[in-house]
């Protein structure tokens, strides 16, 4: 009788070890799947627009947009960067002559945070024709995105001089 009890206890112990190992493997697979899902952030898209297509030099341009995922669900409270690209002109001496050199310059105009509707808006002072782009750098949950270029021109100002005419 002792032999039978010994074998039944050994069989029970082996079954218990197999169940524990199977449970640990299942837990490991669930954890691996969750980790893989965390490393696959959702795709995003960002828009940028302005109600103004041109402003006078020195005036403020309003830039606004929205950050969404690919299913058009808004993404709230995320940082957005607005950058500009402008063509700067400078004078340079070349072989004794002064020439005008044109160079594209990029700079960060403003930083914003999307609101509860995924919207953002900034105001920027503009002195020359500029191209703007909104950037979302992404995070653990969402991939980064960049908007298309938005061009805002400078209005040409016509100066009319008053001339006093005296008729005799």
Image: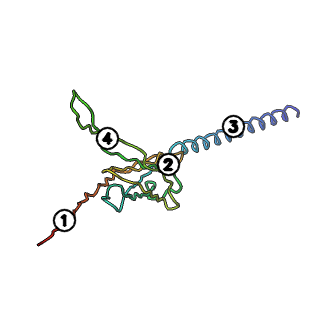
Structural distance between the alpha carbons of marks 4 and 2: 31 Å
Say whether residue 100 is left or right of residue 40.
left
Mark 4 and mark 2 residues within 8 Å of each other at the beta carbon: no
Which mark's residue is nearer the viewer, 2 or 3?
A: 2
Measuring 33% from the left and 61% from the top, which residue is drawn there? 52
Mark 4 or mark 1, whichever is nearer to me: 1
Mark identifier at residue 163? 1
Q: Residues within 10 Å of mark 2 (few under 14, many from 20)?
A: many
Residue identified by numbered label 3: 21
- Marks 3 & 4, CB-CB < 8 Å contact: no
Residue 1 appears at what percent x and percent y? 88, 34
Instruction: Give left or right: position of 16 versus 115.
Output: right
Q: Work out how far the residue at label 1 is from the one at label 3, CA to CA, in angstroms.
A: 98 Å
**Mark 4 sits on what residue?**
104
Q: At x 16% / y 68%, what residue is drawn? A: 165
Label 4 – label 1 distance at C-alpha: 41 Å
Indicate which disc residue 79 carries: none
Q: Nearer the viewer, mark 1 or mark 3?
A: 1
Q: Sequence-wise, which precedes: disc 4 or disc 1? A: 4
Which badge, 4 or 2, comes first in the chain's sequence? 4
Secondary structure, mark 1, is loop
Badge 4 marks a residue whose secondary structure is strand
Viewer-nearest of labels 3 and 4? 4
Q: Using the image, determine if residue 25 lies above or below residue 131.
A: above
Residue holding disc 2: 142
Seen from the viewer's position, the closer of residues 72 and 21 is 72
């Amino acid at each position: 009788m002792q032999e039978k009890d010994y074998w039944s206890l050994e069989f029970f112990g082996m079954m218990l070890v197999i169940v524990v190992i199977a449970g640990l493997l299942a837990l490991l697979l669930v954890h691996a799947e969750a980790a893989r899902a965390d490393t696959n952030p959702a795709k995003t898209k960002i828009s940028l627009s302005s109600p103004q297509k041109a402003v006078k030099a020195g005036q403020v341009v309003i830039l606004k947009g929205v950050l969404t995922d690919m299913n058009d669900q808004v993404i709230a409270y995320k940082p957005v960067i607005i950058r500009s690209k402008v063509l700067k002109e400078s004078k340079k001496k070349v072989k004794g002559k002064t020439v005008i050199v044109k160079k594209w310059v990029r700079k960060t105009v403003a930083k914003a945070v999307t609101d509860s509707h995924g919207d953002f808006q900034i105001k920027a002072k503009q002195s020359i024709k500029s191209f703007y782009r909104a950037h979302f750098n992404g995070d653990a949950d969402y991939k980064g995105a960049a908007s298309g270029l938005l061009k805002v021109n400078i209005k040409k100002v016509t100066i009319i001089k008053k001339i006093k005419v005296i008729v005799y």
